Image: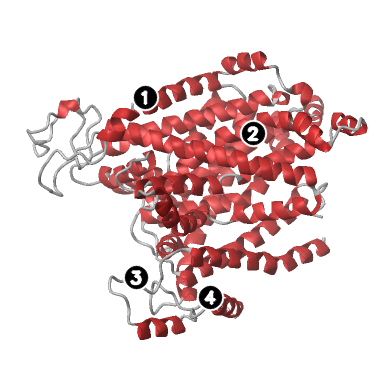
Amino acid sequence: MTTQSDIPAVDHLWRRMLANRRVLFGGIMLLVVVGLCVATVPWTLFHSESRYHFDYQDDMLPAIAPGWQVHSDPLDQTSPLVDSRAYIFGTDKLGRSILGRCLMGGTISLAVGIAAAMISVLLGVTVGMLAGYRGGWVDALLMRFVDIMYGLPYVLLVILFKIAFEPFLERALGTKASANIVTMFVAIGLVSWLTMARVVRGQVLSIRSQPYIEACRAMGLPQTRIFLRHILPNLVGVVIVYATLTVPVAILQESFLSFLGIGVAAPMPSWGSLAAEGVSQAFQPYRSSWWMLAFPCIFLGVTLLCLNFVGDGLRDIFDPKREAAKI
Amino acid sequence: MFRFIAFRILQFPLILAIIYVGTFLLCWVAPGDPFQRTERPLPPQVAESLRRQYHAETWYGFLVYYPIKMIQGDFGPSFNFPGRSVGQIIKDTLPVSATVGLIAMLIAVIVGTFIGTLAAVYRSRAPDWISLTVALVGVSLPSFVVAALLRALFAFEWDWFPVGSWTWSPKEMVLPAVALSLLPMAYVARLTRVSMIDTLSSDYIRTARAKGVGRLKVIFKHALRNAVLPVLSYIGPATAITMTGSFVVETVFQLPGMGDFFVRSVEARDQTMILGVVMIYSSMLLALNLLTDIGYTFVDPRISVS
């Protein structure tokens, strides 16, 4: 429970973040991954889209193994046309570099996560504050709605949303690919604000009963001022924490959708769709293309792990009451 | 207590009606006629008779017809699987999904609570890091990857568990249930850890320790009972997560469950099937939420349900 007096001053906050090894480690790794993905966009965006290395279509064509791998399998002869050393992470079946796909996919996956976090902040904070501050029937109505939404499988909501609105977006935006990605952003965002709404509501309820809010009211401050100056600032901590924790959940949700074949559409990669493709290729009994699964999963796993580290660490920092409890 | 339960049960039809109308609207707004899925348009007479067969001539007719049938236990014919009724499909597939889901939830709650407790007791030390990192793998890798890895290792490589068949033997349920349990397990572990840390720093725990109660007894008897409360409230959402995960895990392990049917029917805009599944699912969930609320009062008698 952060109250006014508990919010650490900003420089103090920085020091605690740097002192928390989990946040520090996670944050640095995150910066590295995000930096790599975003910085390489000019190259990956235009080069990862189906660049065929072979003029003929052949389903039996193997994906090319990473360049540093020793080719011990005599059957695994990559075409002499291609220098496999050029691909340190190997290629997929269409001859596209896995490294490039992973970086591009990372940009998209992270964008999905961040879009979901932004929507969940907007919607969740609005709904949560309304419910917590107004109370009464507004609270009851909004929270029942959240309960119902919480219960429904999000896959259903996302698919229905996609079916219902993607054609409209396609007409509005012109291209299929952009409509698909925007739908993904919005659809996943629309199912991930529920936790935020609940947490913010709880926080508002607990702040509202604090003596200093009562004092404000006794002094005759207008509602809006109490709201904006005295309640909102105290929500910043939880909102940051839960926004951070929304990002990995959204990325995971996108990967589920990709696995079901309804995620980010084909030429565009995402970590989820790369992993889904990898799963189908890596466990072939004969000539397994393990690199198609391993590298996307490493990117995905490391990023999600770091996001969770940072989120959990931030929660510890913003919640000073939970100092070490020893038993 | 009885008034509370009665009130909640009276709310059920209202909530279900809202969910029904909402789902219906989303299905209906979706462009694309479920009856015109072939390249060549159907002759108007055929389309008309198809519509009549499914009671879908007008939207209000459809909206009114099916709820009345559903109350009688009939979910109508499936759009997408002609000749099979939605009720029959649900009856065939739901037990499979429910069994695996239930086992997964049990694993998740029991192991998750244990991991969370361990992490809280040894806070900021090695067991905390190890157990949480293990738990975080559950939320850091998509379950289809974990499921495929489990399948490759325990079924193909070592041949411990059979896959691809379904004869209701417990051996076939192990791998899917484990794969399914990882995500909720991670959440349960984190919830338990946080609330356990809170509980362990409270006065009554210190008092118990000071009076000479053993460490293990304090942790498992005094603290855990209070610390599992947030876990209880998480069971509803966790079921939803397990359900969603089951779509994926059932595909990987080729179980004859509801997930695959459901996803295919949503894609095909099989409206009767969607509505049927959503209704069954949300009634189960509402009942579960009510049971959780009642369960609260047994774990913590101070909480009154109203």
The residue at 27%/42% (across/down) is: A282
Residue that carries the numbered disc 2 in the rendered image: A239
The residue sitting at 25% across, 34% down in the picture is A47
Whole-percent x and y of residue A310?
A: 55, 27
Q: Are marks 3 and 4 on the same chain?
A: yes
State the residue at coordinates (70%, 59%): B290
Say which element carries label 4.
helix
Q: Please tell me whether residue A245 is drawn above or below residue B252 in the rendered image.
A: above
Where does label 4 land, which residue?
B59
**Marks 4 and 1 in Cβ contact (< 8 Å):** no
Q: Residue furthest right?
A: A218
* Of marks 3 and 2, the one in the foreground: 3
Q: Quadrant of the C terminus of chain B?
A: bottom right
Crowdedness near tag 1: few (<14), some (14–19) or many (≥20) residues, C-alpha within 10 Å: few
In the picture of the structure, the residue carrying the numbered disc 3 is B37
Residue A124 image position (x, y, % from top left): 64, 43
Is disc 3 surrounded by few (<14), some (14 to 19) or many (20+) residues within 10 Å?
few
Residue reaching furthest left? A80
- Subunit ID for the residue under disc 4: B
